[in-house]
Image (cartoon, helix red, strand yellow):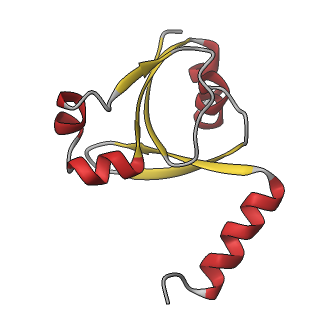
Amino acid sequence: MQESGVGSLIRATYHLLGLRTYFTAGEKEVRAWTIHAGDTAPKAAGVIHSDFERGFIKAETVAYADLVRCGSVAVAREKGLYRMEGKEYVVQDGDVMLFKFNV
């Protein structure tokens, strides 16, 4: 069995409701955030705090699978998998993001 019944139910419900998950990661905490499919980077930043959306500059982004495969942000950067995205970027399910903003 690859996934529990509860995990399958949650995944199916997210899909049915058009929800996606992205992550933020720091020294002390990794956190998952829920957004709607099609949300742009500034909108996703606004889920954390409205100031993040209002003062959005860019999002440093890497796909979760790429980060796990590389083992670190530094290696993902070296391989060109860690990228800077602007205001038009549509957040993908499983993105790991760091927002840059100025208010």
Q: How many marks?
A: 0
Q: Give the side of residue 66 with respect to residue 35, left or right.
A: left
On the image, the x and y values in percent for residue 21 come to 59, 50
> Percent position (x, y) of residue 22?
54, 45
Q: Residue at x 63, y 20 (%)?
A: 53
Vertical order, 56 against 33 (above or below): above
Q: Quadrant of residue 39?
A: top right
Residue 80, image x, y percentages: 27, 27
Q: Nearer the viewer, residue 48 or 41?
A: 41
Position of residue 41 measured from the top left corner of the image (x, y, whole percent):
59, 26
Residue lying furthest bottom: 1
Q: Residue at x 48, y 9 (%)?
A: 102
Residue 56 to residue 29: above or below: above
Residue closest to the eye, 2 or 7: 2
Which of the pair 55/78 is nearer the observer? Answer: 78
Viewed as shown, does residue 13 lie left or right of 86? right
What residue is rendered at 65% in x and 49% in y?
A: 20
Give the residue furthest to the right: 17
Q: Which residue: 51% across, 49% down?
A: 94
